[in-house]
Each structure stands twice: as structure tokens, then as C-alpha cells.
Amino acid sequence: MSGRGEVRVDRVVVDAGQTDTAMARRLREQTAEQEIAVEPPRVSDYRDGKRILHLDRKRGTVLHDCASMDERYRCCNVKVLGTVSNCPYECSYCFLQNYLTDTTLSVVADTPAILAEVKEAAERQPWRLWRIGTWELGDSLALETLSGAAGELVDVVARLPNVVLELKTKSADVAGLLGRVHGGRTVVSWTLNPEAVVKREELRTASIDERIAVMARVAADGYPVALHFDPMIHYPEWQSGYAELVAALFAAIDPAQVAWISIGSLRFNPEMRKVMAQNYPGSRATWAEMVLGDDNKVRYVKPLRLEMYRHLRHLLQGAGADQALIYLCMERWDVWERVLGRAPESRQHLDYEFARSLADRFPQFSQPVPFLPSYLEDG
Amino acid sequence: MAVVHGMLTLKSADINYGHSELCFEAYGRDRSREALVQASVRACGVLVPLVVHRRGDAWQLVDGRVRLAALQDDAADLPAIALEETLSALHLVLAIGALRAGELRCAVDQARFVAFAAALGVGDADLVERLLPLLGIGEHPRLVRRCLAVTALPEAVLRFCAAKQFSMKQCVRLTQHSAELLHLLFAQADNLALSASIVEELAEGFTQLIRVRESTAAQLFSDPEVQALLTAPGTPHSRVQALRDWLRVEVFPQLSRINAELQAVCADLAVDSRVQLQWDRTLENREVRASFVARTPEEWRQVVRSLQADGVDQGVHRLLELL
């Protein structure tokens, strides 16, 4: 078993058409044995798949909208690249344990084809800022030492005028990002919870101290960073836990380098609760009162969510971090209003707010100038 | 490899059957067939050979417990088949499994048989690759662990689950609750209509409540309120429903408190009694719905006037504040 934040795979399988890619070559330098396969390995067990790394070819389009599109909940309209599937970490609340049918750790190795798709989309709408993440079905950086996938994207996105790449992670594996010519167009972000939560619920991920330490290194290398307090987890000492977390964060990084901050609470499909209890009997994430929402997701009851969000918002204000765009992930308009004093009209509106905030605060994003009607018209 | 060593004639005193580690008793065995076998043994003696296996100095009974128990003449010669002494643990278990095949129908017995095999020394790999597929359980080390967890449930729970034919999944879910809670809950089987889904729902509610109250199952079940619900007059179904309702309130203290406040605000509103004010009890949707039925223009006017009465605005404002 590898330690916290470290990743070990037992088997590497490379798609027959990807053996000459940069990723496959890089991997060959680290692991002598590679199986060449025409078809994906296909593993159904949630944990078994985490030990098999599959360098896959690009299958169909990989750029699409983030899945949360229920209009009753305000979402941010971020685009996601489906280039990573499954994750070597073991978060008790991870939806993948109830979602993936093939649990192999899969990374699309054909980076030029991915980038061609991104470029084509970005050129189709040159007026907008494309926020693109690689974390929809996995962690953006957990496999970076092995795959180098994120580094390849960073290099190219640095030259795209209307794209911002977000690499979201719970790892401390940033060595491959440092020293690159990134142009400040990649935002490196971390999912953050108090260490007590990390230890109990985010198994095998990097500790909070490690995450904060590498965040400071990434920021020193000129990358904007982003903070995701999502999912916030309720536990008996949550107030002091989040207070210590925010204090530790802003002792290490300058709020001016924070591009955006998301706040959200634990949420999952109803059937996940039993899966979580079965896979992670030590988890306490679901102990508080939870109810089913209109989007068929179970969340903490609204009074509790409001209390948690307000507390965190207050902490962020106290740390001088509210100059960054703070947003709620998958929350209702009234929760927005009661926590942040505003509610975007739609996901397109929130998308605009991102572009506006970045243009105002980071010179590299000053062009294209965000124009609200264009965003609102883009259904 | 020959499985059968040979035919023997034994006396009952030669056979260790009371504590034979090789004798697997399924909970789901056919009791009516057993009664027939017992009657036949009493009338005609043992006709079908017993199956035994030599371990150390003793013959251990593998198959024939009912026949031996029904035997009235201890001096009678008993036909027996002796299994090969050098059989591996796996082969011994496969032989026993074949003898018990018709009885391993429910998930509890399948899990118990896996535990039985493990106790006899069948290795993990053989359990996963050979035994589990034969039992139709699947093929993964985790499934062995789940079987062992299921067999660790209190015996009364296992017997209940076997009788009610709970699935493996349903049994595994029960392992997530404390043995103390399950013991107390199943002790109420006569008071409550317990099906797999009801057991799961109640156990989950109680487990959640134990966490919320930082209490124990014993404390919870000795709570006079719970006792009153468990022994209330009515049917087992009505008691389950009452318990469900009570658990909902207890497990959701914030929701219950706020809904009670909303209820109180509504009660204070001086609106026509025909008006029904409703809201989402989960508090997720911040909206109040008002509905009424008017059968005449006069009724309509009365209701509308009542909605415009003093204090209604403030009351609705308060409702929305709470939501």
C-alpha cells in the first residue's frame, strides 16, 4: 500500500495506437513493463481498477459541459475535458464509486487530438473565456508523475488567448508544473477540508499541510490558484476546523493570487449512502441531517448548509480573500442570496461573472473583454 | 483422487456427531423432510449410509445428523461411507457442499458455508476462485470478507434472515449496524412487521439516532417513548408506521423544529379556514403555496378578504424567512 498522496499502480496498459505518444514514452522510462492492448482492460470492482493505469486513445468528443445542469441550482458553466477516468485516491464521498462501470485508471494519451478539440471550440466562440477543467471523473494531478498529461495541456493553453485551464487536485504532485511557460493561464486548484476530515474521509490524499505547501510553491511560480471548499463536511468541531484551515491557507498564500473560491456541501445520489457505508465504514460524513433535493441529490438540511457557508464566508472575509470570485456550487438561488448577498440569474450569468472577475484582477485575462449579453445569449 | 475411502459399519458411539466440526447445519434446511427421515429411522433403522471422515482417533460425522438423532437403538450397526483421510480441505468442503447442495439456498447459509470452509482451512484463493463461484456469490476477496461479516451477525438475526430469505446484499447491509442494535430490534419481531426493507429502514433510523444523540442502542430501546411505541395497541404494521414517524422527527431535529415553527406561524394567521398553506417539509424550496376551493362568488370574496387581513403579510413574510 502506498502512503498518503503517493500513487502506485500494479499494471500499465497502453492502447495499441498510443505507444508512440509522449505519455507512453514517459511512462516507459518509469515502468519497464507495459501491456499493449487493443481494447480497454475493463474492471468493474471500484478498488481493483485503481491499480491499473490505462493510456487510452481519444474516443469521440472529450470537451463537454459540467454535468450539473439543473436550472433550480446555480452552476458555473465550466467545461470539462473527459480525459481522466477514476482516481487513485479513496474519498469516502466520491461519486465515482457508484458511477463508473469501468474503474480502470484511464488517461487519454493523445494530447494533440484533445488540444485540437479545445482549440476548435475556443475559436468557434472567440468572444468568451473558456474555463476548462480536467477533473470531472478524476483528479487533475494525482497521476501527473506517471502521465505528465497536465503539463502537456499547460504548455499549449499558455498560447490560447481565450482559455483558462483549471487543474483541480487533492495531491501534492506539482513538480511537473513548476518552471513551465504557463503564461498564468492555468489555474491550479485544491479541494480543501480540515485535516480531521481529510484523515477520515479523503483517504490516501495529500495532507492539508502538504497541499498548502505545494500551493505556495505553485503560486510562487506565477500560477493563479483556486480554492474549493467543496464538499464541506459537517463534524462536531467543524467551526474551529475550517477556521484553522483558512488561517493556515492565508498564512501561506496571498489572497491576490486566488482566482476563485468555491463553496459547496456534501451531496450525492440517494443510493450512494449505502455504497459509502459499505466501502468506507469509518466515514462520518453523512451523520448530520440530510434531505433529498429536487435534483435527486441528498444534502445537509438547508439551515445547516447556511450556517456552514456563512461561517466560511465570514472566515474568508476576515482573511481578506473576498476580492476573489466566491461562488456556491450546485446551490439554490435563495442560499446564494442569504450567504453571498447575490444570486446569478443563470449559469451563463455566473460564467460571465468569472470572466469579469478574472479580467479585472489578472491582466492575462483582460482580453477578450467580457460582454454580458453575449454570455446570456449563449444557451 | 478418490474421495471415498470405503464402506464401514459403525456404532453410534464410534461417531463424534454432537460437536463434529465437519457437520454443516443449514438454517434453511427442509424441516418436513427431516421429520420423514426421523420417522423412517425409528421404523426401519438407518437405510441410507452416513458419511464420516477420520480425524485423529475419531470418526467425525459429515452427513447424517438427523438420522443419528432419531436412532433409538444405540447398539445398531450403522452403514457409513468414509471419506478419504488425505482429502485436502478444499476437496473435503466440496464433498460436504455436494451433500448439502439442496440446503444452501439462502444467502445466510451460503455465507455460513463460506465461513465453515474458511474454518476448515480452505485458503483465501480457493475460497474466492473455487467456492464462491460454485455458490453463485461472485468472485472477489471482498465477498469472502462480506460473508464472514454476515456470519458474525447475532444468531437470532441470521435465523430470521434465513427464514425470510434475505438477499446477500440485505444481509451485508445489516452488518453496518451494531450487534446490540440488531439484537434489540429483532427481539421485537413479534411486535413489528419486519421485512427486509423495514428492518433496513428502522435499523438505519436507529443507527442515525444513536449517532445524533451519542447514545447506545440499549439506552434508546429503554427510552419510555420507544417502549410505548413498541408495545402500543394495534397491529405490527401500525406500530412500524408509528416508529417510522417518530424516528423521522428524532433523526431530523432541525427540520422538525423549523417545521413546528412554521406550523405555529400558520396557526396564528387569521386566514379563512378554507385556505391551505403548504411548504416543502424538507425546507429546500423557499416558497409558500396557498390553495383554496370556492364554490360561490361570496366564498371567493370571503377567502380573498381573509388573505388581506391584518397580520397575514407579516405572517407570510415570517414563513418565508424560516424557509
Image (cartoon, coloured by chain):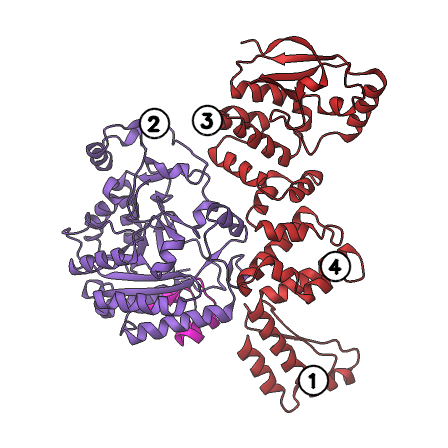
Chain colours: A purple, B red
Question: Which residue lies under the disc numbered 2?
Answer: A37
Helix, strand or loop at mark 3 = helix
What's the residue at 15%, 57% (across, down)? A221
CA separation in Å, label 4 and label 2: 59 Å
Q: Is residue A160 left or right of residue A42?
A: left
> Which three-letter amino acid code belongs to the residue tagged 3?
Ala
Q: Verify whether residue A183 appears in magenta.
A: no
Instruction: Return the chain for callout 4.
Output: B
CA separation in Å, label 1 and label 2: 73 Å
> Which three-letter amino acid code belongs to the residue tagged 1?
Val
The reply to whether label 3 and label 1 mark residues of one chain is: yes
Report the disc number at residue B125: 3
Toward the right, the furthest residue is B43
Question: Which residue lies under the disc numbered 4?
Answer: B239
Q: Quadrant of the N terminus of chain A?
A: top left
Report the disc number at residue B271: 1
